[in-house]
Image (cartoon, rainbow, N blue to C red):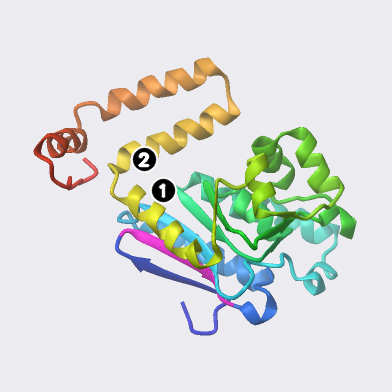
Amino acid sequence: MGTNDAVKFIKEDAIGIITFDKPESYNLVGPNVLYELEAIQQEIEKDKSLRAIVINAEGDHFSAGVDLSFLRTVDSNFIMENLTWLQGLYSKWQELPMPVIAAIQGLCYGSATELILGCDIRIASKDARISIPEVRFGLSPDMGGTVRLTQLVGMGQAKRLIIGCEEIGAEEAFAIGLVEIVVEKEELQERALKLAKRISYMPPAAVRFAKKGINLANESSVSAGLLFEQAQSTYCCGTEDQNEAIDAFFEKRHPVFKDK
């Protein structure tokens, strides 16, 4: 990506790192950010060597959300023409085969909150402040916020945060299940990369099936989830990677997986 981009993407071994890189503007989300995220997602889909993704941000704040000057220009015609694409952009994190980890510091508002809700795991620094205040600006969250927040924290908390537009800190977000890990600010990036690296060392097919199985369990019946478990187990048992994992365990060495 170019040096003037609002979003950077680099690869460290098998980990892809997406970084919001306009700290001087609180990493606001505008059309340029969304187009750049789409291009990065397409790049990730083509790279079969990636095993985990980390989304983070430069500066003191993850993102203050949508650029209100852009929002002021949006009308119903724009929404009819673009909202399906916008929703798909934030849904893509769940569709990717590898886990996506969000590392959140400072302000995480509105559209940025909807983005982290689409990720698989959320790690927040103790100074994080999370809010989803769309109702305050005359609309309801429309990029997955009402759906995914409700799935994560339940109806009552979702209504409090969305309708009441309340801001919560990292510890409260952890207590209600909105984030999974809370760390000191100076430990945030290290913790996110540590988890990403740990995941990247796992057998790739097992990770893919585990992510899909958990997503399915969240959206369907127990019987459907059990059928998926049967299918994934039939595929995985006896693969080269499974045998390598078992052999490496007994031989007390690091496994080398080939996604086979």
Residues at marks 2 and 1 touching, judged by CB atoms closer than 8 Å:
yes
The front one of 17 and 62 is 62
User: Which secondary structure class fits the magenta region best?
Assistant: strand
Determine which residue is flagged by label 2: 207
The magenta segment is 14-21
Q: What residue is pinned by disc 1?
A: 98
Does residue 85 appear in this view? Answer: no
Left or right: residue 229 versus residue 85 is left
Label 1: few (<14), some (14–19) or many (≥20) C-alpha neighbours in 10 Å: many
- Helix, strand, or loop for circle 1? loop
The percent position of residue 203, horizontal first and vertical second, equals 27, 42
- 98 part of magenta stretch: no
- Residue 2 in picture, x, y percent from top left: 48, 81
Q: Position of residue 197 (x, y in %)?
A: 34, 55
Q: Tag count in the figure?
A: 2
Q: Residue at x 65, y 61 (%)?
A: 128
Residue 40 placement, left or right of 141: left
